[in-house]
Every structure is written in C-alpha cells, then in structure tokens.
Image: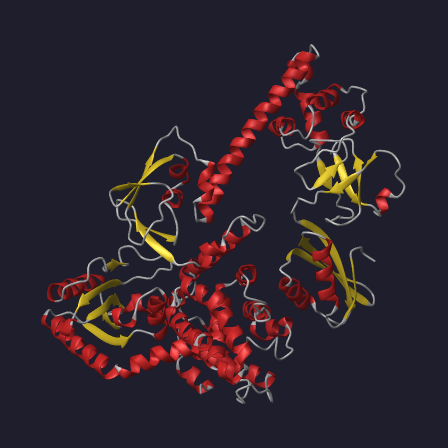
C-alpha cells in the first residue's frame, strides 16, 4: 500500500515535497474516519491515485490535485477553500474532477455513451483533469472486487466504453492496457480465466522460447556494438481475447510472444531492425514504421514480426527510451517539474482535447452525424504517395482521405487510386494503404458522398459546400424576383433602390447587408413586393401580403417546418423569446410588421390584450426539432446545489447551453436554459429536479 513517504521519495525538489506534503495532510484531515468498501482508510485512495499519475511524470500541480480530488465530493470542502489553500489552478482541476466523478452511465444505449463522453470531455477544460480521472478509475477498478457484482459490471462497461478510448487517444498505454484486462475480468470472467489457464499451462514453454530469443538478440546487438536493453513478455489476456474475438482460433495465434528493444538513438532503431531481419525471416506485411510516420497521439516505434527460434513467431518492437516514455505514459511524461514556461507538450495535449470539443460542438445540433465514431473508433493509418501518414477512423473512404489532405482536394476529387489500383469512392480504406486522389478543377462534390464518408470533417465540408451553393442560388433568385417585380410595376431598379432606400430596408428588417436582403427574397422569407413597398414607403401596410394571402387561402398547407400556419405558405416564423414555447404548448401566432409570424404560448402575458393580427397556428407533428426554454429552480438561499441540478439534467440526456444564479432575500433561483424536443421531455426534467433535496419549486416563469 502506498504511503506519503513513497510519494515524497519520487520528488527531487524540496518545494514540490512541501506542496505534496501539505496537500496530503489537508486530505488526511478531511477524510479522517472515512473508510472505503475495502475496509481501508479512505486516504489510501487519493494516495494511490497520486502515485499512478506520478508514474506518468506529471507536474506537481497534478499530483497535488490528485491528492485532493475527493475533498469536495467526499469531504464537503468548497472550491473557495481549496483556492485559498492551494491556489486557483488546483481548485479548478479538483472541482472539474469532482463534477465528472458524479456522472455515471445510466444504461448501455449508444446515446447514453455518446452523451457521457460529450459531458466528460466538455467538463475537462484542463487535460490534467482527464489524467486524474483515468488514474482514479484505474485504482477503483483494481479494488472493484469490493463492490456488488452488478456495480462491478456497470463500472467495467463504463470504463470500456468511455475511459479506455480516451486513454488510447491520449497515448497512455500503461493505464489503457491494465484497464482492458480488468474490464475483461469483470465483464467476461469465464473467457478471461480460460485464456489465463491456457497461458499458464504453457507458460514454461513460452518463457523458454522468450529467453532463447532474447539470448539470440542480445548476442546480435552486442556483436554490432549497439547499446540496448531488452524485455520480453507474453501478450496480455485482453490482447489475446481480441484476436480470438476476431475469429482466430487458439492454435492460430502465433504471435503471443513479444519482445521490446530499447536503444539510445533513432539511428540505432533502424540498425537494430536491419540486423534482426538479416538473421530472422520477417512475416510479410507486418513491418510498421511509426518513427517516420508517428501516430496522431505521438506514438513512435518500429514494429516487426519474425519467425524466431524454433520457428515460433515473435512480435518485436524497437524504440528509444524517450519514445517508450511517451508510448507508456502519454505526453504528460514530458512535462517538466523545474523548467519554467515548459507548456509546449501540455499545449499539444490541450489541442488533442480541443479536437474532441470541436467534433462535438460542430455537430451538437446535427442528429445525423455519428461523431462518436471519430472520437473512439479504431484507427487506421494510410499513406500519401510521398509517404506522409494520415490517421483515419476505421471504415473511412478515399473521400475522407481527400478532405483530410485539403478541402479543395475533397471538393474537386474525381477518382481514387489505392495501392496502384483504381477503386470506387465507396472503397473502405485498409491499414497501410497508399492512396492517391485524382482531381479536376471544374468538378464539384456529390451529395451522395454524405452516404459513404465516415469522418466529421468530410461531412462538414460537403455540407458546407452545398450550403454555400444554395446560399448563392437563393441570392441570385432573390435578385431576379426583385427585378421581375420592378419590371411588372414599370419601375427602374436605380430609381427605387438607391443607397438610402437599401440601408432603410436593411436596418428595418435587421439584415446584415444587401446580399442578405436578396437571400430573404430568394428563400421566400419576404416577397419582392413587400421589399419594394418598404423601400418606396408605400402606404400599403407591410403585413398586407400575409393578410391578403390568408384571405385568399382557406386550405391548410402541410408545411415542412415545425409550425403550421393556417392557410399561409412560405412565411417567416419565429419563436417568441418572451415565453419560449416548445412543442406541445398551446400556441398562438401574431403577424408582425417586419419579422413574419411570432409564435407565443397561448397564455403569454404579451398576448392577453391583443385582439388583432392573431393567426391560428399549430405544431407540426412530423417535425422533430429542438427548442430552448427556461426553467427556474427555487432553493433555500444557504444551499448550493447547481452542480447537482446540472448532473441530474445531464442524466436525462438534456443539453444545458447556459445557466444563471439569481440571489434573492430568502432564496436562490437558478435560471437554467434547457434544450428539449417537447413538453414531455421538459416535464421529465422538472420531475427529476423536483426530487432533489432543498428544491422548493421548479417553474417555467420567473416568480
């Protein structure tokens, strides 16, 4: 069991030792008398977590935060107290860990996994939060035997689905591998024990083969004056399980034996591989050069598989000591304790985190984008003809590859050549493929590509192209409609639309510019006649086109939009900000002078005194839109339960774009904006919040 003395021995700086000792004493005092389910003192957990992150060579701030990471959730310490004792940076990290530690995977559905990943990554503003979370989960999985069997499996599933992919993408192989084995043990104990039993039954033979191969390689390196270190191991249970799960039989798994050679210089890596291949026949297509083309998580190594002693197959990796640090411990292993301003490596990992956020943010409103695949799916590595490596999710196509190179390459792609063979754009790229994209400057994307691409980047670029194209078409149509209406009225464009009149229309209707004006006509938000009347200050009421159209039409038109307006088609519809109705609320429409029809709740206070310009509107049952609305949560003034509210709403798979705290004399009101599809979703959220302790009332209107 790890002690504070064990941690202090790993530190060189006296200043760092003082900080770590202070954090330990604070945490020990906070957790005094608490026990874990293992019957150990609670302080053993933060000590173990701190020890795990120390093995990743993180900075002292991370170590201190690891020791304190449970003081908020299991010690009732406030962020302000931590900030006063240990500074703002530590307080922010601990608060973030505390928040994400409250999240759990509610079920096995894909939507739940996606949502939990989004929340976890979104809350981790500092990448060190994820390092502490991974270390926290690793120690909890090591002691998972102490919880009930149902909880054991739940934690293992959550770890496998959520945290292991993140450990992989951050390049922390030491944590990833151990978590994989632990998850397999709890999720499929029979399979785990069967593999372990088979390994143990042949362990003597396997170790003899490893030792013989090691001796042969040692002689080979010494004969050629290469300074090195060598380690051998039998592959992990989970690694073997993966091979069996992919259809291989036990007797067909030949590369159970693995050796790793550590050298001092990059040139020694290539020299060592050359010597190994000169003595042992390599297995075809199993050589990988991740030094010249590193993986995107900055992993570097040379991989080969050879027929070794006694004809057995050995997997061999050759890397420098520095490469091994990154491969096993992640980029955090290069953070420095001493050098000031050494944030370059940390910033690289922050950029990694930003990739997750960008994927999530760019698609949070696009239900058809399966972006979770890009975050956690298996990756393949394909090459340009010049040898540059591209990392793509498994299942990617040449179109994904083209857009990864450059937007223009994707937009003008006309053909693909893979390994010197012409392939269709629907071809699924394989690990190691060499891909060449043929382009033509006059070509353009095809909407059918959206059905075959895999990456978020490609989907976004293709949609962006057609959105821009549609935009241009609407602008041109709008200008054409305007000119036709002017000719019909025997008016000249220059006589009606001078600088002053154009600015008048732009300001009146809140357009961005003249192009936006034409867009509004081309997309049928406004009629050309309405715009001309406004520009010429015609006495005809600006709402007449709407009212006249209503008088002309008695048949209800089936709109494609979320709101159906009785008898009116192609009318601009806006959800009123004063009452923020959502699908299922009784609603009424109000014909505005400049902004189409404003949709209000039927009981909206702003509609009570109005008798004219109202129009019948209904929700379109076929629509599946999301709506933003407010909730006001009333609690006792002395209670701070905002994090509990956010947590319970998150568990309902409801997105919270913003919130605000309103302090009153005798109570606090949390104003929360939620994104829901209908009143049923909203009622579920209200019910869940209402069950929280200290919640007095939940309303949709401010009281």
Please indicate, yes or no, whether residue 315 appears anywhere in the rendered image: yes
Instruction: Point out the image quarter for the C terminus.
Output: bottom right
Of residues 242 and 488, which is closer to you in this image? 242
Looking at the image, is 594 positioned above or below residue 273? above
Please indicate whether residue 285 sits to the left or right of residue 632 in the image: left
Snapshot quadrant of residue 287:
bottom left
Looking at the image, is 40 positioned above or below residue 325? below
Q: Where does the image place residue 405, in percent across and percent down from the top left?
A: 37, 44
Q: Where does the image place residue 428, in percent across and percent down from the top left?
A: 36, 48
Q: Where does the image place residue 468, in percent across and percent down from the top left?
A: 52, 34
Please indicate, yes or no, whether residue 15 appears anywhere in the rendered image: no
Q: Which colour scheme appears in the figure?
A: secondary structure
Which residue sits furthest top?
490
Identity of the residue drawn at 72% across and 37% down: 573
Of residues 237 and 36, which is closer to you in this image? 237
Q: Where does the image place residue 143, in percent across and percent down from the top left?
A: 48, 82
Please indicate whether residue 60 sits to the left or right of residue 419 in the image: right
Looking at the image, is 14 positioned above or below residue 242? below
């Amino acid at each position: 069991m790890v002690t504070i003395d064990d941690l202090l021995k790993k530190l060189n700086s006296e200043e760092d030792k003082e900080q770590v000792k202070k954090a330990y004493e604070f945490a020990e005092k906070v957790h005094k008398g608490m026990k874990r389910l293992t019957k150990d003192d609670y302080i053993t957990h933060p000590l173990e977590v701190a020890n795990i992150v120390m093995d990743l060579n993180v900075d002292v701030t991370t170590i201190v935060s690891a020791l304190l990471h449970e003081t908020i959730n299991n010690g009732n310490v406030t962020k302000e107290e931590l900030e006063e004792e240990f500074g703002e940076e530590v307080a922010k990290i601990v608060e973030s860990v505390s928040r994400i530690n409250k999240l759990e995977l509610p079920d096995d559905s894909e939507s739940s996994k996606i949502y939990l990943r989004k929340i976890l990554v979104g809350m981790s503003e500092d990448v060190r939060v994820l390092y502490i979370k991974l270390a926290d989960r690793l120690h909890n999985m090591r002691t998972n035997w102490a919880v009930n069997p149902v909880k054991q499996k739940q934690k293992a599933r959550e770890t496998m689905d959520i945290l292991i992919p993140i450990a992989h993408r951050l390049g922390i192989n030491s944590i990833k591998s151990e978590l994989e084995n632990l998850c397999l043990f709890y999720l499929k104990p029979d399979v785990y024990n069967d593999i372990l039993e088979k390994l143990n039954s042949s362990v003597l033979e396997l170790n003899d083969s490893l030792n013989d191969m090691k001796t042969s390689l040692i002689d080979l390196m010494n004969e050629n004056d290469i300074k090195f270190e060598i380690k051998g191991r039998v592959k992990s249970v989970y690694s073997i399980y993966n091979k069996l799960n992919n259809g291989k039989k036990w007797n067909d798994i030949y590369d159970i034996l693995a050796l790793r050679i550590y050298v001092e210089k990059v040139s020694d890596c290539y020299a060592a591989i050359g010597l190994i291949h000169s003595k042992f026949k390599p297995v075809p297509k199993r050589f990988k050069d991740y030094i010249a083309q590193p993986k995107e998580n900055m992993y570097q190594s040379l991989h080969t598989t050879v027929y070794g002693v006694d004809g057995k197959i050995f997997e061999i990796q050759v890397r420098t000591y520095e490469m091994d640090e990154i491969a096993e411990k992640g980029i955090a292993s290069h953070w420095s304790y001493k050098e000031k301003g050494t944030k370059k490596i940390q910033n690289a990992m922050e950029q990694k985190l930003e990739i997750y956020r960008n994927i999530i943010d760019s698609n949070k409103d696009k239900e058809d984008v399966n972006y979770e695949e890009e975050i956690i799916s298996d990756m393949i590595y394909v090459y340009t003809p010049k040898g540059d490596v591209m990392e793509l999710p498994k299942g990617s196509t040449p179109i994904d590859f083209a857009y990864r190179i450059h937007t223009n390459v994707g937009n003008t792609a006309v053909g693909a050549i893979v390994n010197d063979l012409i392939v269709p754009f629907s071809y699924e790229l394989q690990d190691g493929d060499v891909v060449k994209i043929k382009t033509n400057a006059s070509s353009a994307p095809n909407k059918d590509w959206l059905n075959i691409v895999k990456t978020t980047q490609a989907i976004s670029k293709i949609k962006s192209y057609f959105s821009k194209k549609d935009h241009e078409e609407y602008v041109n149509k709008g200008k054409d409609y305007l000119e036709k209406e002017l000719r019909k009225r025997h008016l000249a464009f220059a006589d009606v639309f001078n600088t002053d009149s154009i600015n008048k229309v732009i300001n009146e209707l809140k357009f961005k510019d003249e192009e936006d004006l034409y867009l509004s006509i081309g997309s049928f938000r406004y009629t050309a006649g309405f715009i001309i009347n406004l520009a010429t200050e015609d006495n005809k009421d600006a709402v007449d086109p709407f009212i006249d159209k209503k008088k002309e039409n008695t048949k209800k038109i089936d709109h494609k939009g979320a709101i159906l307006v009785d008898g009116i088609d192609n009318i601009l519809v806006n959800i009123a900000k004063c009452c923020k109705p959502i699908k299922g609320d009784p609603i009424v429409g109000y014909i505005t002078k400049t902004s189409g029809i404003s949709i209000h709740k039927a009981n909206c206070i702003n509609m009570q005194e109005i008798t004219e310009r109202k129009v019948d509107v209904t929700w379109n049952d076929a629509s599946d839109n999301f709506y933003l609305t407010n909730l006001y949560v009333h609690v006792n003034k002395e209670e701070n339960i905002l994090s509990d509210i956010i947590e319970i709403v998150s568990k309902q798979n409801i997105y919270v774009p913003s919130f605000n705290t309103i302090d009153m004399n005798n109570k606090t009101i949390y104003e929360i904006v939620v994104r829901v599809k209908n009143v049923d979703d909203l009622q579920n959220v209200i019910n869940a919040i209402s069950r929280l302790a200290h919640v007095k009332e939940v309303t949709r209107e401010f009281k």
